[in-house]
Image (cartoon, rainbow, N blue to C red):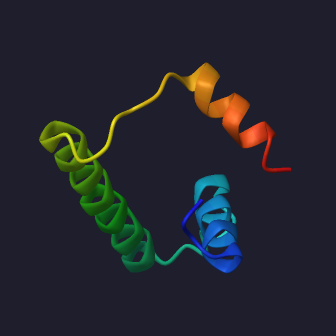
Amino acid sequence: MRLSRDQRELVVAVLSGELDDGDDESVEDVEAAWLEETRRRLAEVRSGAVTPVPWAEAKQRLSTLR
């Protein structure tokens, strides 16, 4: 939720495949960016900088933001 509205919309578009214009290079760039992001997040969890929460709790928290 720290992302701006535009950034969140971009994430949704990427995840839903709306940005797939057939350009393999852009797909590779997106995949590389997601790989980097998942590695960063995993490092945060392993270091104790963040604590993951169960999906049910995360879902409940998100529902209060609407």
* 30, above or below 43, in the image: below
Q: Give the farthest residue toward the left.
A: 47
Q: Residue at x 23, y 56 (%)?
A: 40
Residue placed at 56% from the left, 70% from the top?
3
Instruction: Tell me where residue 12 appears, x and y as whole percent.
Output: 66, 59
Residue located at (13% from left, 43% from top): 47
In the shown orientation, is residue 4 left or right of residue 45? Answer: right
The quadrant of the image that shows the N terminus is bottom right
Q: Residue at x 68, y 31 (%)?
A: 59
- Taking depth in this image into account, of 53 and 33 the one nearest to the observer is 53
**How many numbered marks are there?**
0
Residue 19 found in image quarter: bottom right
Q: Position of residue 5 (x, y in %)?
A: 70, 74
Residue 9 horizontal side relative to residue 11, left or right: right
Left or right: where does residue 7 sit relative to residue 23?
right
Q: Position of residue 65 (x, y in %)?
A: 78, 49
Residue 11 position (above or below residue 56) = below
Q: Quadrant of residue 61?
A: top right
Q: Whole-percent x and y of residue 66?
A: 86, 50
> Is 29 on the left or on the right of 46, as rendered?
right
Furthest-right residue in view?
66
Residue 3 vs residue 14, the one in the foreground: 3
